[in-house]
Amino acid sequence: MRQKIEFQCNGYGDYWEPAITNEGETPEQCAERIVQHFNDTLYPGEKARTVTGVRLAPDAQVTIEHNWYKLNNVTIMKPGPHDQYRCLKCHAMGKRFTLDGDVQVDYRHRSKKNCKI
Ligand SMILES: [Zn+2]
């Protein structure tokens, strides 16, 4: 399950950086991964960061996965065989082209209001 988290770094006061964990990753691992990437790509004069705190975001319990339901009864054949889906939570539209594939979110619905940010 992916979770919304926040983490703090040394030298940034009381600022909490928002982040979303990858599948199978703990909040601590997620913060370390992001800060490691930052440290690996420092600009001249920038200081490496160290994670000093990690916590779940206040709305971490809100799931961030879409909850798809299928709109069509019969597979749609154009432009290629696919099924159409709508998300019950954010109303994004999506298409799925193969039986075991992921639903691909319509590009018009990829906004911050939708489930996956
Ligand atoms: Zn959704």
Image (tube, rainbow, N blue to C red):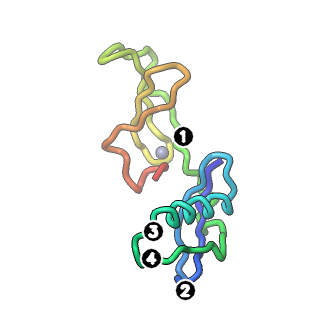
Q: Quadrant of residue 105?
A: top left
Residue identified by numbered label 1: 67
Please identify, in this view, whether the residue under mark 4 or under mark 1 is nearer the observer.
Answer: 4
- Type of residue at label 1? Asn
Residue identified by numbered label 4: 46
- Type of residue at label 4? Glu
**Residue under the point 59% across and 64% down:** 59
Where residue 42 is drawn, which disc sits there? 3
| Proximity of marks 3 and 1: CB atoms separated by less than 8 Å | no
Q: Can you say whether 65 is above or below 74 in the image? A: below
Please identify, in this view, whether the residue under mark 1 or under mark 2 is nearer the observer.
Answer: 2
Nearer to the camera, 48 or 104: 48
At mark 1, the secondary structure is loop
User: Is the CB–ligand 1 distance for label 1 below 8 Å?
Assistant: yes
Q: Is residue 65 left or right of residue 55?
A: left
Q: CA distance from mark 4 to mark 1?
A: 41 Å
| Mark 2 residue crowding within 10 angstroms, few (<14) / some (14–19) / many (20+) | few
- Type of residue at label 3? Leu
**Residue under the point 41% across and 34% down:** 94
Nearer to the camera, 74 or 49: 49
At mark 3, the secondary structure is loop
Q: Can you say whether 10 is above or below 2 in the image? A: below
| Mark 3 residue crowding within 10 angstroms, few (<14) / some (14–19) / many (20+) | few
